[in-house]
Image (cartoon, rainbow, N blue to C red):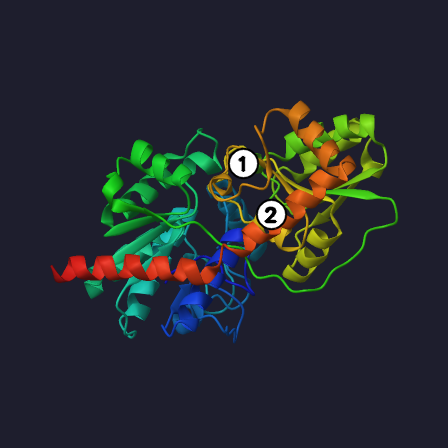
Amino acid sequence: MLGWEFPPFFAGGAGIVCYEMAKALTEKGHEVTYIMPFGPKNVSSDAAKLVIADQVLPGLRIQVVDSLLTAYATPEEYKQQYNLLRNLSGGTLGKDVTLALYGRNLFEEIIRFALRARIIAASEDFEVIHAQDWTTFPAAMAVKKVSGKPLVVHVHNTVFDRYLNAGNAAEYNFEKAGMEAADLVIAISHFVKNRIVESYGIPAHKVRVVHNATPKMKGVSFESKVGEKIVLYAGRITIQKGPDYFVEAARKVLEKDPNVRFVMAGSGDMLPQIMQRVSELGLLDKFWFTGFYSREEAEKLFSMASVCVMPSVSEPFGVIPLESLAKDTPVIISKQSGVCEVLTHALKVDFWDIEDMAGKILALLHYKSLHKILQVFGKEEAKQLTWDKVADKLLMVYDEVAQKQLA
């Protein structure tokens, strides 16, 4: 399995999904080797054998600074970090390590990872290659070429989701090439499968839908301040996730009920813009911005909230609502999300309809019977979405590609 992030080193939901997926496979008696481009030293996991490419190939390891490869990085963000590092170092990172060891852009760095993964795979014994997300597709294709093993690529999102149809030609080409090279493609929702078929020209018979399940949460609970109602937004603060619509809905909620606090948990490129808008509306005292949150902090956030809102503009799946329901907090989700396909006991809105969003927030805050119904039945629904079932579906996909290869 090849990925870009993995707990305890992760930046978002995809990393958590990869962990749960690998752990479920391991618990069924299968061995999972998870290769990622960089990460902390001496890291280990109960879910998989973790292999950090930079550490396995010490001749290529950057010793002085952290790698520039970060999950969810855009080409522009990578270039900015590369230029900053070049300026700070004066062109050298140490006696024997120079900037030549970095790709000059994100796509070169992805190819460098592919070269390392190919070398690492030569010493591993495996039956199937499973690539998580587009950044690992070239590495998976390289491993397939040298090993002859069947390839499954897992599509968590597409360039159309990340850029809201504005697109990025280079990223699109990486995605398309990986899907075409794969023996089978896994989509995390029918929403994503339709995109793969319609926008990438991949035959529908080559795509399998495997929905995500509910990430495991601990049993710890927390209480909010007496009488204070908390509405939570959790996730990356980027255009794809719809944080601006959340703020506008919050303004309308506060016009009706001033005894509400809005928590925006997460980080992202839109954070300064969102904070500016909250300031313009005079609502800074009603908002709390947490920044990036850990898994432990997530426990507290989901427990203390009265309502969790996921207003995504384009969400291939979205595990945030499942995490929220696991902690007894009912959810409002956008109709433009894959998780809509598996949740019945949730209130659903179009991301752009801030009037409807505000009305449903107020309904959950003020109608106790509605809150209780969605809390109890939503939690039960989330409990039925287990990673054990996901692992069974993955094994069916693995068996299918293995049989195809034998044929």
Considering only vertical position in the picture, is 72 above or below 243? below
* Quadrant assignment for the C terminus: bottom left
Where does the image place residue 229, in percent across and percent down from the top left? 80, 42
Q: Is residue 53 visible?
A: no
**Residue designated by label 2:** 378
Q: Give neighbour class at mark 2: few <14, some 14-19, many 20+ (Cα, 10 Å).
A: many
Query: Relative to residue 131, is residue 369 drawn left or right?
Result: right
Mark sitting earlier along the chain (1/2) = 1
Do the residues under discs 1 and 2 have CB atoms within 8 angstroms?
A: no
Residue 200 image-quadrant placement: top left
Where does the image place residue 109, in percent across and percent down from the top left? 40, 53
Q: Secondary structure at mark 2?
A: helix
Pick the front one: 74 or 241: 241
**Residue designated by label 1:** 240
Q: Residue at x 57, y 61 (%)?
A: 216
Amino acid identity at mark 1: Gln
Q: Residue furthest right?
A: 226
Considering only vertical position in the picture, is 295 above or below 181? below
* Quadrant assignment for the N terminus: bottom left
Pick the front one: 317 or 44: 317
Where does the image place residue 70, in percent across and percent down from the top left? 51, 54
